[in-house]
Image (cartoon, rainbow, N blue to C red):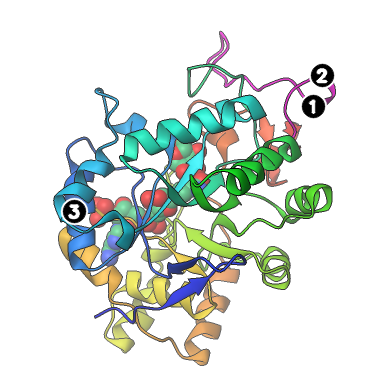
Amino acid sequence: MSLGRTVKLNNGVVIPQVGYGTWQAAPGEVEKAVEEAIKVGYRHIDCALVYRSFSIPLRVFIVATGIKASGVPREELVLVSKLWNNSHRPENVEADLDLTLKQLGTSYLDVYLIHWPVAFKPGKDLFPKDSNGVVQLDEPAEKGGPSIVDTWKEMVRISKETKKVKAVGVSNFTVEQLKKVIDATGVTPSMNQIELHPSLIQPELFKFCNDNGIAITAYSPLGNNITGKPRVIDHPEIKKIADRLGKSPAQVLIAWVAKQGFVVIPKSVTPARIKSNFEDFELSDADLEEINKIGLANQVRSNIPFEYETSWPVDIFGTPEEKGQVKAF
Ligand SMILES: NC(=O)C1=CN([C@@H]2O[C@H](COP(=O)(O)OP(=O)(O)OC[C@H]3O[C@@H](n4cnc5c(N)ncnc54)[C@H](OP(=O)(O)O)[C@@H]3O)[C@@H](O)[C@H]2O)C=CC1
Ligand SMILES: O=C1CO[C@H](CO)[C@@H](O)[C@@H]1O
């Protein structure tokens, strides 16, 4: 049974603390998994325009099929989605949102996020590539390309002037990038969705978000990755704690995120896991500390776009892996 906890965003919008992630599911799986998730009680679904590319030859966003099949009315759900990198120019932002709304079969999103602080060459291609197969970035701001401030201003305009989004925020933003958009506009993002698990503890970013009323959503909370790096869910000490508490390692990791007041969006297409991941529990302070120690000794960032098979030639996080690339804003 879920504890049913919620988090209030800085503009009053309330969202369920445990949501459901929809990235990386094979064709045919997503709609069933979303339906299952809603049936077992999830009311917060995390989406992104770019996730459609995994499954939809017909360009119909199949998350919408799962939502429809669940029979739960739209108003009872919290839908989060994200602006993709090829639409950062202000004149393209609302069109990207409209496409997302169309694909989801809804007239509004609860939260709309800038997916990355990185602008790709604008156009229909989600991943525009050069002849070496490397992603093509938009022009830098000095040469007429969009800065994150330009994109953020447009997100804010849409949130104020239309009824298409209830709250706007960002994803994969560092403290520096957050400060930049806040200082330039005076408007603080409602949310920063970031990779977060015990193997990626970022005290400075957590403090900045907490001090400024920015809700943090933890993605890849189980340490999922596409690069084969070690996953925190497989760590023997996490397994040991889970056994002692009579919980699964995934439940322990989800509880670890929730204990810190963050939102968490685990993904699974396996019915038993979809259900058990939603059965959150209150972790003790002592267990939180013990898990912090394990994680801090094994820090791993799995989602570094420069390392993707189709590489983005950009340094977003300042990691050694990204050294020598163009700084993201
Ligand atoms: N803003 C951003 O840039 C990003 C956002 N996200 C969002 O965050 C969501 C979650 O992150 P994601 O990277 O998918 O990874 P997760 O950390 O949620 O891990 C998902 C993996 O863990 C497995 N799993 C799920 N539950 C259990 C369990 N109880 N026991 C064992 N294994 C389990 C899943 O397998 P199976 O499905 O086979 O059960 C899958 O392989 C995404 O789906 C997406 O919505 C993710 C990455 C980037
Ligand atoms: O959310 C995510 C998953 O898909 C995207 C691209 O394939 C990633 O860049 C992103 O972090």
Q: Residue at x 39, y 46 (%)?
A: 47
Judged from this view, the residue extending furthest toward the top is: 131
**Badge 2: few (under 14), some or many (20 or more) residues near its Cα, within 10 Å?**
few
Which residue bears the numbered disc 3?
35
Please state the quadrant of the image where ligand 1 appears: bottom left
The location of residue 1, given as percent across then percent down, is: 24, 80
Q: Is residue 254 above or below residue 118?
A: below
When the figure is inspected, residue 259 is found, relative to residue 177, above or below; the finding is below
Which amino acid type corresponds to the residue marked 2 in the rendered image?
A: Lys
Q: Which residues fall within the magenta stretch? A: 129-147
Q: Nearer the viewer, residue 38 or 311?
A: 38
Q: Say which residue label 2 marks.
A: 143
Q: Residue at x 44, y 62 (%)?
A: 221
Mark 2–mark 1 Cα distance, whole angstroms, equals 5 Å
- Under circle 1, the secondary element is helix
Mark 2 falls on what kind of element?
A: helix
Ligand 2 within 8 angstroms of badge 1 C-beta: no
Do we see residue 52 in this rendering?
yes
Q: Earlier in the sequence, mark 1 or mark 3?
A: 3
Q: Is residue 139 magenta?
A: yes
Q: CA distance from mark 3 to mark 2?
A: 46 Å
Question: Residue 50 placed where, x, y %?
Answer: 43, 34
Give the amino acid type for the residue marked by disc 3 in the picture: Glu
Residue 247 spot, x, y in % from top left? 28, 80
Determine whether label 2 and label 1 are within 8 Å by CB.
yes
Q: Which amino acid type is shown beneath numbered disc 1? A: Ala
Magenta stretch, main secondary structure class: loop
> Label 1: which residue?
141
Please tell me in which quadrant of the rendered image residue 313 appears. Answer: top right
Structural distance between the alpha carbons of marks 1 and 3: 42 Å
Residue at 33 percent of width and 48 percent of height: 22
